[in-house]
Structure formats: C-alpha cells, structure tokens
C-alpha cells in the first residue's frame, strides 16, 4: 500500500516534470502552430546558463536562476526575430526540421562551451520530506508546485486575457490578425521569449533529476508523448497527458521491469489508437 | 523561353518529354555507370551507402512528400528490412529472394501501421511513428535468438546466383540497378491514379472522399509502398554496414531521412535524390572545409554537427522549396535569360494559416 | 477637391514571375465611396492587398493621408486607420464569434464606443448575435462573411476596404450590406474602397468607379457616367439580351470607349 | 611492398569516435588525451623519426557514420592502425572493414568482450571488460560481505547485455541468486518503479549496469526508498560527478583505471594535468587519461617495433608488453600472444564524502 | 422514379438542428435550386448527401438506394458529384491533375500494375485524358490546363471545381453556389454551361444559389429553406412570390 502511495507520488512529480517541459512547446504551438523540437535544447541551455551564473560566476542559486531565466528570455526573443520569423508559412515538416537543426546547433554549441561531461547544479531543495512512511525530495515538490503554477498562469493567459486571445488568433489566421491591427511579429517573439523562459525553469527544476549535460534535452521526448496523449496544443491536456504517463510509468516498471523506457510510447500509441487526436482533440473537421 | 508543343496525350503521360530532361537524366545515369572507372573503391562504397539512403529517402518521399503522412520513424522500416534480409541471407536464402522478403515484410508492417494510424493527422502521426520506431528498436533488441539482440549480428557478403559480389564495382551496379528500378516505379506510380489519389489525400481529405477516394486505403497503400522501399533500402544498407545493431535504426536515422526529403524538396522524386546527395556528402564537404579553419576550432568536439545543423537551417530559411525548388528557379533563370525578372526570385510575404483542420 | 485620403501611384505587384497589377494609379477622396470593377483575375484583390500591406509591391507608392505606406506590415497599415475585409472569409476559426468581434476592436480603448459598435454589428447581423458563442469556423459561408465585415467594422477605421463583401450573402443581406456601406459612409464619414462583382449595386452606392482589366485600370469615371457606358453595361451590369437561341452566347469584344 | 600508413616521415593513425552524440562525453576527452600524447611524441621528434598523424572522424554514435568513417580512413587516408574507436556496435562494424584490410584495432573505447574475444591477431584492448568488471566486483563482495542475492538494473543495449551476462555468469559461479533483472533505456531519468522492485526483491546487493546520470538517479532513489544493500557499478559510473551528486555515499565502482587527483603533487600527473588544461581549457577526465594511456601504449609499441614498422612488428611488440603501469595509478597492463585484454587486475573505489576513495587495489577477476 | 429522394432528413450539431425533417425529391433531368437565408442549412444538405455529416434521422435515396449506409467515398460511385461552397481543390497540383483525380471513381486501379506501368495503365491514362479534355473543351478552359490551382483567381477556381465534378461523369451534380464571386458576364457563361450540362450530358443538377437571376434562368423547381425547415417548394415564380420567402430571404418584392 505504501508502495502504491510512494510510486504514485513520485509518478506525479515525474509527470509534472514532463509537463513543465511540455508546457513550453505547447505554448509555442498554441501561439504559432510551430512544433519546436529544439525545446529540450532550450531547456538544456537554460540549465547551463543558470549553472554558469550560479556556480561558475558564483552568484548563488537564486540570483543565478533569475539571471539565467532572463537570459533565456532574451535568447528566445532573438531566436524568433532572427530565425523563426523567416519561415512562417512554410510546411510544418520544413519548420519542424528547422527546429531539429537548431537543436543540433544548440547542442553542439553547448558542448563546445561547457563540455560533454555531466555537471550537477546544487539546488536549495535538497532535503527529503517524510510523511506516513513515504518520502519525497523537496526538489520534487518544487517541480510539482512550479508546474501547477506555470500551467495555471498559461491557462489563464490564453483563456482570460486579450493578449492570449490575440496570440491564438494570430496562430489561426495570421493575415486576419494583421488586418485586425494585432502586432503579430512582436507578439510571436514575446511568445518565444516566454517559452524559452519556461524552458529555463524546467531545466533548472529538473537538473537534480537529470543532471546538467548536453543530453539533457532527451527528457523532452517523453514530454512530447505526454502532450500528444493530452491532445497537442491544449494546456490542460498537456498536464493531464504528462501526468498519466508519469504516474503509469513507475507502476509498469515495477510490474514488468525489462521494458522500462518504452512504456510511455506504448501507452501513447494505445491512447492514440482509441482517440487519434488525444484526450482533448485540438483539430477539427473542416466546415465545407 | 522554350515552348514545347505537345502533339499527343502520351507526351503528358511519358516520364521524360523534354530533350533537355532526357539529356540530363541520361547523363546522370551514364555517369553512374561509368563511376567505377572514375572513382576509387572508397568513393564507390560511399556511393553504395548513398544509394541505400537515397532509396530509403524515396520511400519516405512517397509517404511524406506525396501523400502528406509525416513519419519520424521511417528508420524502423529500414531496420526491419535490414534485419530480415540479413537473417535470411545468413540462413542461405538467395539474395533476390531475401531482398524481396525484406521489402514485403517491411511493407506489410507499414500497411498495418498505416491502417492503425489512418485517423491521425500531422503531428500526431509524426509522434506516433516516432514511438513506433522506438518500440520497434526495443523489439529487435529483445528478439535475441534471431537478431543477436543488442549485441547485434554480422551480415554475410552478397552472393548473386552463386557468384560472390565482393568487388566494389560489382556491388555498385547491383545497387544502381535496384535504385533505378524503384525510381522508375515510383515515378510510374505517381503519374497513375494511385499516385494521384495520394496527392489528393495530402491536399484535401474531404475533397478526396467526395471524388471517390477511399482515404484509409490510399494511406495504407502509401504506407505499404513507402515501407517496402525502405525495407529494400535496409537490405542494401545491411551489406554496407556489415554489422547490424538495433540502435542503428533509431531516431537519428529517421531524422536524417526526413532531412533528406525536406532539403531535397517535398513532393518530388528528384528532390529525394538531391536531398540524399546533400545530406550524405555534407560531412565530406565539412571535412574539406576543415582545412580552411583555424587550428583551435578544428579540434572542437561537435563542430561537425554544428556546421551540419547550420547548413540545414540556412537551407530551410533561404530555400524552403528545397534543392528541387532551387533547381527549377535556376532553370527558369537560364531559359529566360536575359529576360528574367528579378521579382521572379523574390518571395512574397506569406502568412500562417491554421493546420488544425482536417 | 482636397487631397485624397488614399492614393496609389503606378503600383506594380508580382507573384513570382506573374505581374498581377501593372501600374495602377487611383485616388480615393476622403469621405467618398470608390468602387473597383473587373473581371475575375483582373487584379482587384491584389490591388487591395498591396494597399493594406499584405503583399509587397515592386514599384510605385501607396499614400494614405499623404504619407507613403507601401510595403509596411499590414498591422501597421491597419493601425493607421485602414480596415480590410478580405476576400474569402478570413475569420479566426477556433475562436467564438464574440471573440472574433472583440479582436476586431484590438487597440481601441473606448469601452463605450466598442460596446456601441458591437451592438450595431449585432443589429446589422442578428445571426451573429444568436451564434456569438459558437466557433467561427463552423458558421455557414454567409455567416462567416458577415463576421468578417463585422470584425472590420469593430475597428472603427477611417478607410474601409471591402473585397467582395456580398459574396455568398442572401439577396436580403446583400441589400442590407450596401445600405450599411452607405450609412457608415454618410453617418460616420468612413471612406470606402469597394470591390464588387455585383456591379449594379456597387455603382449605385459609390461615387466614383474604376474598371480594371488584366492588371491595369482601363476606365475611370464618376459612377453615373460609368453606368451609361456601353461596355460597362454590357459586361458588368449583365444587360439582358436575347438572341436566336433564346440566349446570346457569343461575346462582344471589349473596346473601352 | 611498403607498409600501408607508414611513410618515411610519418605514420598515420585513425579514429572513428563520437564527438557530438550521446557518447561525446567519452569520445571527446579520450581523443583529446590521445592527441596530447601524440603531440608530445611529435615534439620529441616522433617515433623513429616519423611524425604521427592522428586523423579523427566524428560518427555521432551512428553505425553508418562509423562505417563511412572507417572506409574513408582505410581506403582514402590509408591508416596504419585504428586507435580508440568509440562504441561497441560502431567498432564491430568498423572492425569488419579493418580486419579485411589487415589493419589493427587498438584499444577501442568500450569494455565489450567482443573487442578482443575471440582472440584475433589484430584486436587489442587494455580495459578489463565490463563482463569481468562485474565478475570482479561480485567475487569481492561474496568474500567480504557474504552477499547471497543479487539484483541487476541495466541498459537495454549491448552494454547492458554484456553486464547481464557478466553478472549472471558470476552469480552462478559463486552460488549467488540473481533475483531480478531490470532493463531501461539509457535516457531514463526516473527509477521509482525499478528501485521499488529491487527493494522489494530483498537483494543483498544491487548491481548497477548504468552510466552516469542513471547511476545517480537509481542510487539515490534506492536509498531514499530505504534499500539497505550494497550498491555496485563499473568504470562507466566511476566519474567525479557521481561522487559529487549528493546522496551517493557508499556507492562502489569497479574500474581498471584511476581518476587523476589534481591535488596530487606527483610531477608526471601534474604535468599532464597542466598541459591538458592549457590545451583544452578544461580539466582532464578519466577518459582523457584513457586516451593518453592508449596513445602511450601505441607509441611505446611502435617504438619497440623498430624503424621497419609493419603490422606484424607492431602486434608482436604489443604482445611483448608486460606490467606496463600508466602514469595515473591504474592497474598494470600486460599483453601476450593469447592475452589481448591488457588489464591485469581491477580497482575497487567507493564514494566517501563527495569523493572517490580506493577500497581495494589489485582486485582480481 | 425520382433521382434523389430526401425524406425527413435531420442533422444536428450539439443541440441545434441545422436541418429539421427536410424532405424533397429531385426528378431526372431537372435543375433543382435550393435557396434560403444564410445559415438555413443548404450546404448541410449537400454535406449530408456526401456523407461528410452524419444525419441524425431520415433517409436519402438515390434511385432507391439508401445513401446514408454508404461510406463517403462510395457516394460518387453511384453517380453523385459535388462542388464546395468555399472551394476545395488540390492546391499544389495543376488543373489537369485535379481533373484527372476527378476521374478517380471511373478508373480501374491496381498499384503494382501502375508501378510497372503495364500497357493497360497507359491505355487507361489516355482514356481518362480524353474525357478530361472533353470537359476542358466544354467549359472553355484549355488555357488553364497546366496552371497550378494556387495561382488561379477565385472565379477560375470555381470553374475548375465544376469541371472536376464533371469528370466523375455524374448523373447528379450538386453545386454549392456556382455563381458566387462571378460577375454578371461570367454568371451568364455559367448559366449556359449548366444548361449544356443538363441538356447535352443529361445530368440532373441540384444547386444552392443566391443569385436569383441565375436561378430564374435555369431552375425548373426551387426549394426555399429557412432555419433548417422547408418553407416552400415549387416553380421559381411560386417560390418567389411566397410571402415567407420574401421576408426571410429576398427582402422586398423582387
Ligand atoms: N498567390 C498567387 N500566386 C500567383 N499568381 C496569383 C496569386 N494570386 C493571384 N494570382 C494571379 O494574379 C492575377 C490577379 O488575381 P486577383 O486575385 O487579384 O484577381 P481578382 O481581380 O481579385 O479576381 P476575382 O474576381 O476572381 O477575385 C490573376 O491572374 C491570378 O492568376
Ligand atoms: N460542422 C458544424 N458544426 C457546428 N455547426 C454547424 C456545422 N456546420 C454547419 N453548422 C451550422 O448549421 C447551420 C447551417 O449551415 P449551412 O452551412 O448549411 O448554411 P447554408 O444554408 O449553406 O448558409 P450559407 O448560404 O451562408 O452558406 C449554420 O447555422 C451553421 O452554423
Ligand atoms: Mg478577388
Ligand atoms: Mg452554404
């Protein structure tokens, strides 16, 4: 019984970790319909930047985190203004490949700057919390809280603010958005900035779990699976899908150890076969 | 500009109508036939690997370029083909039969997958195929008695009708023949009703249905043909790798295949081949470039993949229609010279419109 | 006559190698309604898109209130006071009708004015009121057209550019549309540039007209004059004529004056 | 017929390695280390007056890339020997080509048994294999702690399979029970399920066939969930970050080489450390040492082979190496006509207070 | 027997009925026009016939054959082709390719024969091409044959869609606002074509149209729809003079 509680709790925190990454690219997708495969790399870059500020420059965790997140925001803004803006209107496959290429570049760049060895980013949340026979690290609880917070904020942003509405409009029909005086270019750059900041937060929060190195970005692939389960593009869907995967995984691992690592994908395929567009579908039959 | 007056429907049906086209394709084939005289065995083996990848790229082009089904797991079919082929050849099955079996089995798995995912669209499909390939990699790893598991298995040499083809030039002709056969076949398919149905499904499913196209079966056909070709490519590739292990056919290879067709230009057969040339020989080009770089930079680990990424990114930003598109423009420029207009080569502003409609 | 509110000088716009408009100059005086007629493919849509910055011109100028605005981003042009109702019902498909209209008022801060305009739009198009919570993408073709017009109206523009506003609307609504155009022009002083296939209605409501053929302006005159032109009558007003087979099936060559 | 890859003024060595993929953490520093040693040799006039040219091809851990790289090195660059090829499958595929061309494969960057087994005249490796590392570790704990039951968590990969065989065989031989084998993808980050399974199986010892990050994740999760048994891994997890990660105290690693301690004042070590840092702007890692040692071994063998360098002479010279000791305090290395695994024994290290401490030298396997 | 018999057709989205028990029938060889205010449910009728929407109740029979049991792609095989209100062409293909796809329901296919391009395939292609050229001739659009659809202006696309539907050699043609976006001259051309299609090809036409001029010129019977219900069916004059049609649709006495 306590095993069940323990595994569920860790599963929830792991699921929240996936969600934290997923939120970033769902956000970009929602706003630009670009599937950003380089999001994991942004997360890695965020972690390295925070590491640089906090450890290498010795500014301490909190200041380092703040500066790291801000730098990533600027980076995200520039990434859109310099690169992504130019490929608007290209086929989804091309844009996707572009993000893959950007990911390659970022990864190589990080390797050249910081090397390929893993580093650990000492976090202030290193203690464990015990209650009722189960234990969880404070860092895991921080992940859960951060995810809930960011998820809530993004959801409010899209559903309650005019800016959120405008961004969605721009993704659905950019020309019409322009005609409605919406400053599409600036908004989209802003979205990239925010998404990169969310990625940095994810990198920073997940660092105790994954350590910081160039391969950290692979964490993002399961986050993709989670977002797809939820219905790609939906914020609550992403949270739901990632939680499902996060919670199911440890139980499947426990019950049947030899296949650890592919359950997320098997689960996702199973969901997609039943609901080809995820739990909260985001595509619609065209009205003709 | 040159004007072609068509005098029969056959001219629209035939593959190569313009004398220029015929000359170009003929010259390319002639060059490929003469290659063993011109190239060392190193370049011939590079060519053989390139032929295998180009073939797999054509397979993916059928699926993604022509019928709009994005697959990020196509390496799985290459892997299935490679393993089936290698296992059969190792058990003494003649090369052509083994290759055919590899293609058919990969095609069968592809069709089954195609049926299962026929209701998925765009990105869902992409991620589903990616997941499929990850699962497939694990399955191959788990089938240890047959596939050698994660340790992998060696691939026997090629023997055709009892004759061992050990020389690079012999393999060269074999690979060239297989590649040309499938290029021809796919070109045929695309000028016939089945191919047009695939294109129709890509552009508008609703419309395709209203014209009597069974969308699901069109998708299955596309998956079948595409996976079959990828499987055959896998069989060819196996002999060049000489050693198979499951992770060879992982996400990295799938992305590389995707890269090839995007860089080449989605929706054209020559695009798949141009793209394969580009992606396959880019590392060689980067290698050559290294001679020009300062010493400290050259020994930087990861430089190759950075430049590789940069090339691809630049390509997509500056020539989103791919090499095929660039080639068309170049031809237009030459044909209309000196009457070309500068505006021809300038892109109008474009606007994103939602892809969330089925 | 005072300076025109909008003027194009010698505009040339290309799609790749295709020259879609070739040296178009026109003037829209402040407070007037100007209509552009032309067969399909004449370049009307291209002209309007060039004016509102949706596509770039290669040559020429677009002057709005005396200032050049060609090749700017369309949102900037729109902020200067040009509201564009595009061809082909460009609504935001996954937002509700209400949200679409709200976005039309982007950048306006006068709450009262917005609320009033919203009421006006719902008054013009009662269908939109009943559907205001539904996703715009699932409206019928005509309803989407109403929404596109309503959205541009919500922006309270100085100049309204309408690309075939009556497309797909019922005869009743078509008539309403023209009445609305006249009303906002008379009552709120909004200048209108109108492209319409329904030439008779357009010429009735407009002050001045241009006729375009394959990318060029071939005729320009006050509407009253245009209506009397033989060619306009022949090709745009659909003069009912009958011949031997009951219908006249051959075409007369266009001569333009 | 002159020897391929040997010219009057130079000898060409090649390497297919991972400078950008998942194993860049091995490939890059090892290549750097080797390069450092080779440049030293060249600065000292080369080997019998020949400068060593070291050609490195990045494979990004892809087999097709490794095959292409090998083809290039063999057919176009005409290398004399392959040094430090990275990755098991990559090296196996590469060796299919080099063997045919009669080119020796020296010290591939992997501990797979297949690198020198079955015995092949051209294959040499100086690591004790992962297989034997597992055996060595289990033997030790059987003796010292009377371990009866073992659990194994390892990669679903060739690396994991190798370890599984090592652990299975050793356990059988030593009369221990293997209670559970779990495998995971190398990229996994969460081990709650696996750790619970290990804990509930009640093993005395958990063998971790893991790499760096999953070692940390699995070990800390095990401890967090209250697993009391011994935890052991192999050389792959023997890296500073594993010790520094926090919560790793008590974790053992079996390794054939030792990480250089920068605070150690010994001049050889210090010279290496400073030179490496100066050249590559970062501290050397275990892999840098491995690269350096591999190059050193190769250079020593070439020197011993004499001015008339041929493959036969090289392999003969290698087979004559006895009790070679590297500069960094690793175990001794000896080769012989039927001993192409160079390592003579192992080291047992343990994490103590965010650092690795030696528990046992000369650990037999 | 009627060509098309629609009986009690009900289509609903959520709680709202877009069509509420609509019944009508279309006789062989006639032009049957459907008019009605925007959102009346006209396009929905077409979408129900071509099985894009699922009907909640009712039946649609074509020569007595129940359509609602068929999968969408079978409908055209019975001989029912359609156009779309907002144009659904294959944008990145040429006009010719679009029309050839239009032949899809009339050609025999076999992927492997096509892969090898056996002689039979070529014969089939030639035959399809001949038919397509006839249609191009009929609609006077040979000059557009090799143009890419995405480069065409609105009006031309409308015609391409009509041509594509004709390529299926339908017995019944469903046209959703064929004249919208056309100027009077082009509308006149359209009316001639529709007459030719009806008289020379013997195709029965059901069309949704707001241009009462066109309706008046070619329709044999008209059905007026509003709010998903039938207001009135009859000759053009009868329907036009119906009071409810006038208030709901025409506005004033037309
Ligand atoms: N995206 C495009 N690419 C290439 N050519 C185009 C494109 N859009 C329009 N054209 C061409 O430009 C010319 C003008 O088209 P435009 O759409 O402006 O005509 P229009 O007068 O609005 O016609 P309609 O009355 O049918 O709307 C046409 O010949 C058309 O073929
Ligand atoms: N897929 C859908 N989802 C929700 N509502 C729909 C859908 N399709 C149609 N409707 C609704 O059904 C009603 C009828 O739509 P339909 O398209 O049939 O109208 P129409 O008569 O063709 O009008 P128009 O002349 O404007 O094209 C409209 O109110 C529309 O909003
Ligand atoms: Mg137009
Ligand atoms: Mg309609």
Image: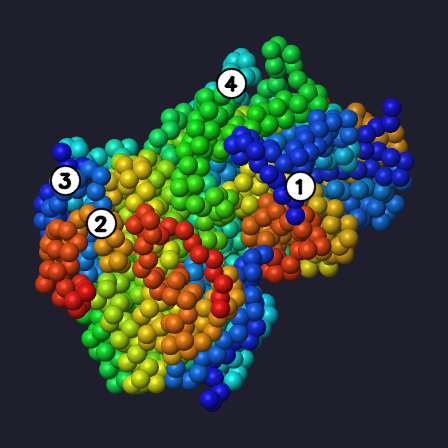
**Residue density around tag 3, few if under 14, some if 14–19, many if 20 or more, within 10 Å:** many
Please state the chain letter of the residue tagged with numbered disc 1 in the rendered image.
B
- In the rendered image, which residue does mark 3 sit on? E5
Q: Residue at x 51, y 61 (%)?
A: C214
Question: Are circles 4 and 2 on residues that touch, CB within 8 Å?
Answer: no
Of residue A48 and residue D140, the one placed in the foreground of this image is A48
Q: Is residue B8 above or below residue A280?
A: above
- In the rendered image, which residue does mark 4 sit on? B98
Please state the chain letter of the residue tagged with numbered disc 4 in the rendered image.
B
Q: Nearer the viewer, mark 4 or mark 2?
A: 2
Q: Nearer the viewer, mark 2 or mark 3?
A: 2
Of residue C118 and residue C18, the one placed in the foreground of this image is C18
**Residue density around tag 2, few if under 14, some if 14–19, many if 20 or more, within 10 Å:** many
Q: Which sits earlier in the primary sequence, circle 4 or circle 1?
A: 4
Mark number, residue C224: none
Question: Where's residue D325, x and y in %?
Answer: 71, 40
Cα–Cα gap, marks 4 and 2: 64 Å
Query: Can residue C28 be seen at all in this image of the molecule?
Result: yes
- In the rendered image, which residue does mark 2 sit on? E219
Cα–Cα gap, marks 3 and 4: 56 Å
Cα–Cα gap, marks 4 and 1: 29 Å
Please state the chain letter of the residue tagged with numbered disc 2 in the rendered image.
E
Residue B143 as seen in the image, left or right of residue B212: right
Q: Residue at x 75, y 54 (%)?
A: B293
Number of labels in the image equals: 4
Disc 4 Cβ-to-ligand 1 distance below 8 Å: no
Q: Quadrant of residue A18?
A: bottom left
Which colour scheme appears in the figure?
A: rainbow
The residue at the far bottom in this view is C2
Q: Quadrant of residue A255?
A: top left
């Amino acid at each position: 019984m306590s095993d069940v509680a323990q595994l569920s709790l860790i599963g929830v925190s792991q699921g929240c970790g996936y969600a934290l990454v997923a939120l970033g690219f769902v956000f970009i997708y929602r706003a630009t319909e670009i599937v950003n495969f380089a999001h994991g790399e942004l997360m890695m870059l965020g972690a390295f930047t925070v590491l640089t500020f906090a450890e290498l420059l010795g500014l301490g965790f909190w200041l380092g985190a703040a500066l790291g997140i801000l730098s990533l925001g600027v980076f995200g803004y520039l990434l859109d203004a310099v690169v992504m803006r130019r490929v608007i209107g290209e086929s989804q496959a091309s844009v996707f490949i572009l993000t893959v290429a950007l990911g390659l570049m970022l990864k190589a760049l990080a390797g050249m700057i910081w090397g390929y060895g893993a580093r650990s980013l000492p976090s202030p949340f290193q203690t464990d919390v015990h209650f009722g026979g189960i234990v969880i690290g404070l860092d895991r609880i921080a992940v859960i809280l951060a995810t809930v917070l960011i998820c809530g904020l993004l959801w409010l942003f899209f559903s309650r603010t005019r800016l959120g509405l405008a961004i969605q409009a721009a993704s659905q029909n950019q020309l019409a958005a322009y005609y409605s005086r919406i400053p599409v270019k600036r908004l989209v750059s802003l979205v990239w900035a925010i998404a990169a900041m969310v990625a940095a937060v994810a990198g920073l929060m997940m660092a105790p779990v994954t350590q910081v190195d160039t391969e950290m970005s692979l964490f993002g692939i399961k986050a993709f699976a989670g977002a797809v389960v939820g219905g790609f593009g939906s914020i609550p869907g992403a949270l739901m899908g990632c939680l499902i995967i996060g919670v199911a995984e440890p139980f499947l691992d426990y019950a049947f150890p030899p296949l650890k690592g592919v359950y997320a994908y098997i689960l996702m395929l199973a969901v997609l076969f039943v609901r080809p567009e995820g739990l909260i579908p985001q595509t619609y039959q065209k009205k003709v | 500009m040159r004007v072609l007056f068509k005098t029969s429907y056959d001219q629209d049906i035939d593959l190569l109508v313009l004398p220029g086209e015929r000359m170009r394709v003929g010259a390319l084939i002639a060059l490929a036939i003469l290659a063993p005289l011109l190239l060392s065995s190193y370049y011939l083996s590079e060519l053989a690997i390139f032929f295998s990848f180009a073939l797999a790229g054509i397979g993916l082009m059928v699926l993604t370029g022509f019928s709009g089904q994005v697959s990020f797991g196509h390496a799985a079919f290459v892997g299935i083909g490679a393993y089936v082929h290698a296992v059969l050849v190792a058990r003494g099955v003649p090369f052509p039969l083994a290759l055919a079996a590899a293609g058919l089995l990969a095609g069968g798995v592809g069709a089954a997958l195609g049926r299962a995912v026929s209701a998925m669209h765009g990105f869902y499909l992409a991620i589903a195929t990616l997941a499929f390939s990850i699962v497939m990699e694990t399955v191959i790893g788990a089938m240890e008695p047959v596939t050698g598991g994660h340790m992998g298995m060696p691939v026997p040499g090629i023997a055709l009708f009892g004759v061992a083809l050990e020389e690079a030039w012999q393999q060269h002709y074999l690979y060239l023949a297989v590649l040309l056969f499938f290029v021809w076949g796919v070109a045929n398919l695309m000028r016939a009703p089945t191919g047009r149905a695939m294109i129709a499904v890509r552009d508008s499913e609703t419309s395709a249905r209203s014209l009597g196209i069974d969308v699901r079966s069109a998708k299955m056909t596309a998956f079948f043909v595409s996976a079959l070709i990828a499987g055959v490519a896998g069989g060819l590739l196996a002999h060049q790798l000489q050693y198979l292990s499951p992770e060879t056919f992982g996400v990295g290879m799938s992305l590389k295949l995707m890269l090839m067709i995007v860089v080449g230009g989605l929706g054209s057969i020559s695009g798949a081949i141009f793209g394969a040339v580009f992606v396959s020989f880019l590392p060689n080009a980067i290698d050559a470039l290294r001679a020009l770089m300062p010493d400290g930079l050259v020994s930087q680990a990861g430089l190759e993949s950075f430049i590789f990424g940069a090339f691809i990114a630049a390509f997509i930003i500056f020539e989103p229609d791919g090499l095929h598109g660039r080639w068309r423009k170049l031809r237009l420029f030459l044909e209309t010279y000196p009457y070309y207009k500068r505006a021809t080569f300038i892109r109008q502003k474009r606007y994103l419109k939602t892809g969330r409609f089925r | 006559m005072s300076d025109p509110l909008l003027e194009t000088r010698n505009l040339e716009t290309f799609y790749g190698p295709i020259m879609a408009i070739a040296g178009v100059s026109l003037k829209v005086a402040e407070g007037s309604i100007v209509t552009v007629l032309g067969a399909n493919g004449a370049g009307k849509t291209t002209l309007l898109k060039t004016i509102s910055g949706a596509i770039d011109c290669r040559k020429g100028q677009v002057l709005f209130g005396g200032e050049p605005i060609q090749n700017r981003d369309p949102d900037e042009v729109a902020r200067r006071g040009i509201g564009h109702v595009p061809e082909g019902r460009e609504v935001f498909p996954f937002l509700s009708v209400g949200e679409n209209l709200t976005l039309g008022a982007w950048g306006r801060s006068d709450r009262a004015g917005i609320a009033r305009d919203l009421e006006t739009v719902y008054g013009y198009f009662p269908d939109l009121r009943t559907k205001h919570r539904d996703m715009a993408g699932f409206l019928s073709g005509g309803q989407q057209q109403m929404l596109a017009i309503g959205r541009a109206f919500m922006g309270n523009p100085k100049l309204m550019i309408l690309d075939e506003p009556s497309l797909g609307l019922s005869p009743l609504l078509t008539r309403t549309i023209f009445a609305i155009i006249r009303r906002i022009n008379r009552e709120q002083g909004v200048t209108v540039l109108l492209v319409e296939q329904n030439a008779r209605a357009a010429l009735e409501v407009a002050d001045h007209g241009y006729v375009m053929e394959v990318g060029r302006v071939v005729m320009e005159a006050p509407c009253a004059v245009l209506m009397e032109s033989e060619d306009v009558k022949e090709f745009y007003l659909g003069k009912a004529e009958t011949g031997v087979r009951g219908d006249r099936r051959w075409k007369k060559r266009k001569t333009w004056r | 017929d002159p020897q391929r890859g040997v010219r009057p003024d130079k000898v060409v060595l090649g390497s297919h390695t991972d400078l950008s993929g998942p194993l860049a953490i091995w490939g890059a520093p090892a290549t750097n280390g080797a390069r450092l040693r080779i440049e030293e040799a060249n600065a000292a006039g080369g080997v019998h007056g020949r400068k060593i040219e070291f050609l490195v091809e990045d494979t990004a851990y892809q087999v097709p890339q490794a095959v292409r790289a090998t083809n290039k090195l063999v057919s176009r660059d005409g290398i004399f020997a392959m040094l430090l090829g990275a990755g098991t499958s990559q090296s196996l595929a590469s060796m299919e080509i080099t063997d045919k061309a009669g080119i020796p494969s020296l010290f591939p960057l992997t501990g797979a048994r297949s690198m020198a087994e079955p015995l092949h005249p051209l294959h040499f490796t100086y690591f004790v294999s992962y297989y034997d590392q597992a055996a060595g570790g289990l033997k030790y704990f059987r003796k010292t702690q009377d371990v009866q039951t073992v659990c194994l968590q390892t990669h679903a990969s060739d690396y994991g399979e190798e370890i599984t065989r090592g652990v299975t065989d050793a356990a059988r031989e030593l009369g221990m029970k293997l209670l559970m084998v779990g495998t995971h993808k190398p990229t996994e980050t969460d081990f709650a399920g696996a750790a619970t399974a290990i804990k509930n199986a009640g093993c005395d010892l958990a063998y971790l066939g893991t790499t760096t990050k999953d070692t940390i994740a699995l070990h800390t999760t095990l401890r967090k969930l209250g697993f009391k048994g011994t935890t052991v891994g192999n050389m792959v997890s023997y890296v500073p970050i594993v010790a520094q990660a926090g919560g790793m105290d008590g974790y053992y690693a079996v390794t054939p080489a030792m990480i250089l301690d920068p605070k150690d004042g010994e001049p050889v070590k210090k010279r290496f450390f400073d030179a490496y840092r100066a050249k590559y702007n970062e501290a050397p890692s275990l892999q840098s040492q491995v690269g350096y040692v591999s190059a050193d071994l190769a250079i020593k063998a070439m020197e011993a082979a004499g001015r008339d360098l041929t493959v036969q002479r090289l392999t003969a010279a290698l087979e004559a190496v006895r009790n070679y000791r590297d500069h960094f305090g690793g175990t001794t290395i000896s080769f012989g006509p039927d001993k192409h695994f160079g390592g003579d024994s192992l080291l047992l290290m343990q994490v103590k207070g965010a650092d690795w401490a030696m528990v046992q030298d000369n650990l037999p396997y | 027997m009627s060509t098309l018999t629609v009986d009690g057709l009900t289509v609903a989205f959520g709680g709202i009925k877009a069509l509420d028990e609509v019944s009508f029938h279309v006789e062989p060889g006639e032009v049957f026009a459907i008019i009605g205010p925007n959102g009346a449910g006209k396009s929905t009728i077409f979408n129900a016939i071509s099985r894009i929407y699922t009907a909640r109740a009712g039946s649609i029979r074509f020569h007595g054959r129940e359509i609602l049991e068929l999968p969408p792609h079978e409908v055209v095989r019975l001989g029912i082709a359609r156009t779309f209100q907002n144009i659904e062409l294959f944008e990145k293909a040429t006009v010719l390719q679009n029309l050839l796809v239009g032949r899809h329901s009339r050609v025999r296919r076999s992927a492997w024969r096509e892969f090898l391009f056996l002689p039979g395939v070529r014969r089939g292609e030639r035959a399809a091409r001949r038919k397509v050229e006839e249609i191009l001739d009929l609609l006077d659009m040979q000059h557009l044959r090799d143009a890419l659809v995405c480069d065409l202006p609105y009006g031309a696309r409308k015609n391409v869609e009509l041509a594509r539907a004709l390529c299926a050699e339908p017995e019944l043609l469903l046209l959703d606002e064929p004249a919208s976006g056309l100027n009077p001259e082009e509308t006149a051309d359209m009316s001639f074509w529709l007459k030719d299609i009806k008289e020379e090809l013997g195709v029965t036409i059901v069309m949704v149209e707001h241009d009462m001029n066109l309706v008046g010129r070619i329709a044999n019977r008209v059905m007026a729809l509003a709010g998903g219900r039938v207001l009135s069916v009859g000759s053009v004059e009868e329907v036009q003079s119906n009071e409810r049609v006038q208030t709901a649709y025409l506005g004033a006495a037309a």
